Amino acid sequence: MNEIIARIGNHKYEVSIVSNKEILLDGIKYHIELIRLNNNIYKISINDKQLQMYAKEIETGVYETNISGEDNKIQLQTRLEEKANKFLKKNNSNSSKKVIAPMNGLIVKVNKFSGDKVNVGDSLIILEAMKMQNEIKSPSDGIIKSQNCKVGASVERGELLFTIE
């Protein structure tokens, strides 16, 4: 059984996928059906109640949604990802964290800038190396103190990209 943690605002929900038509949401069983109508529009049936849903991934594991006129931002992660993030946060000191380039490459997208608040796992940049795009994520919670990269810049392995405090 696949287990997913869904966060909507300050609320946390535990979702277990029983089958392709059944889930457990906080221990309560629901019959579901999801039909993709186009790129980001879905028809969803929950216990035979029909709804229309808009969902678009805005960063890895984070979705902007609108269900029956209600806007939400939903973060999804597996139980293992949640445990890993808790471990990383627990072992995170309040000192500065440096984000360095793990390889030579070209910066094709910058997602966070100096002064932005970040959480562990937030996407900072997309680095292209050998025609593959690699997402560089925040190693800690904090505020970006310095940003040493921009779109179109070439970076070398070990080069400082961000400092997070």
Image (cartoon, rainbow, N blue to C red):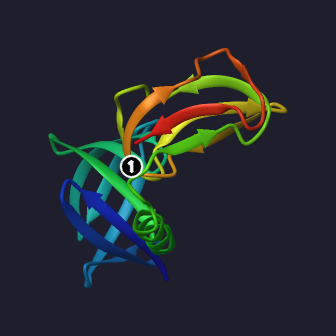
Could one spot residue 44 in this view of the protein? yes
146 in relation to 56, above or below: above
Q: In percent of the image, x 39 and y 49: which residue is there?
A: 119
Q: Residue 92: x, y in percent?
A: 44, 61
| Residue type at tag 1 | Asn
Judged from this view, the residue extending furthest toward the right is 130
Which part of the image, by quadrant, shows the C terminus? Answer: top left
Q: Position of residue 84 (x, y in %)?
A: 50, 69
Give the quadrant of residue 114: top left
In the rendered image, the residue lying farthest to the top is 152
Give the vertical position of 135 relative to 94 (above or below).
Answer: above
In the depicted view, which residue is nearer to us: 131 or 46? 131
Tell whether 20 sits left or right of 152.
left
Q: Position of residue 30 (x, y in %)?
A: 28, 76
Give the labeled residue for mark 1: 119
Left or right side of 153 for 43 = left
Q: Quadrant of residue 127?
A: top right
Viewer can see residue 54: no
User: Image quadrant of residue 18?
Assistant: bottom left
Q: Residue furthest left?
A: 69
Dot 1 lies on which element? Answer: loop
Q: Residue visible at 26% across and 70% down?
A: 13
Tell me the residue at 72%/42% (across/down).
102
**Mark count:** 1
In front of the other: 27 or 50:
27
